[in-house]
Image (cartoon, grey):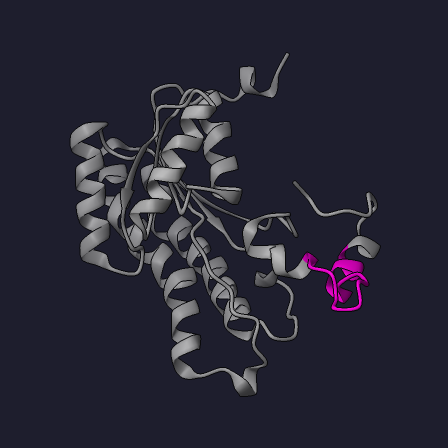
Amino acid sequence: MSILDEFRVDGKVAWITGGSYGLGFAYATALAQAGAKIVFNDRKQELVERGIEAYKAEGIDAYGGVCDVTKEDEVQKFVADVKEKLGPIDILINNAGIIKRIPMIDMTVDQWDQVINVDLTGPFICSKAVLPDMIKMGHGKIINACSMMSELGRETVSAYAAAKGGLKMLTKNICSEYGQYNIQCNAIGPGYIATPQTAALREKQPDGSMNPFDRFIRSKTPAQRWGT
């Protein structure tokens, strides 16, 4: 028996932010196999179109649209459009995120704000947009991609770690405020996965040797490889 025989979300509307590729695409594909109607967004039309084609290749009829998760007016409009076309959102995965690997003393406030806005304020805005309908329905699931950096600190990722730590606490707060409406909010830390966002960490050094971070991750993993 497949895990998907036990885990069914038939007919549920699932919104995966930044779901046109990478981990978001993987989450969405699994949910589609479990029966969900897939909704995703990205900041650029070309990424949305690329995502739609990728879903079609998997036999998934996904609804995609342009929406910047840091802009509340765009998020509210996107959620309203989805509700009109597919129904209210039952599942939200706050997946969209960015990272800037810059030593803290070299990072500008603008760079800090960019990371905090996407990785922490974005999930707040998106959760805020779907919660009213979830309350009315008496159910809902919100999943926040918190990363291992919500628990661990690492050099050059001060803004990212701060945002993910904040997102972990936002997760707990949503549970506290809205659990009474049968709304569950969970956080996940997938670990180091081979995606476009982590590609730079796997690039060879100019002399052809392994990237030090790549070597570090492989040395800490029983399988001696990145996750897929």
* 137 on left or right of 223: left
* 131 on left or right of 163: left
Q: Is 117 part of what is drawn in magenta?
A: no
Please identify the quadrant where the C terminus is shown: top right
Q: Is residue 138 above or below residue 57?
A: below
Q: Nearer the viewer, residue 60 or 45?
A: 45
Q: Nearer the viewer, residue 42 or 17?
A: 42
Q: Is 204 part of what is drawn in magenta?
A: yes
Question: Residue 115 appears in which quarter of the rendering?
Answer: bottom left
Q: Position of residue 1 (x, y in %)?
A: 64, 11
Residue numbers of the magenta segment:
202-217
Residue at the spot x=38%, y=52% of the render?
A: 174
Q: Position of residue 204 (x, y in %)?
A: 73, 61
Residue at the spot x=18%, y=38% of the render?
A: 81
Q: Is residue 212 above or below residue 74?
A: below
Residue at the spot x=20%, y=34% of the render?
A: 83
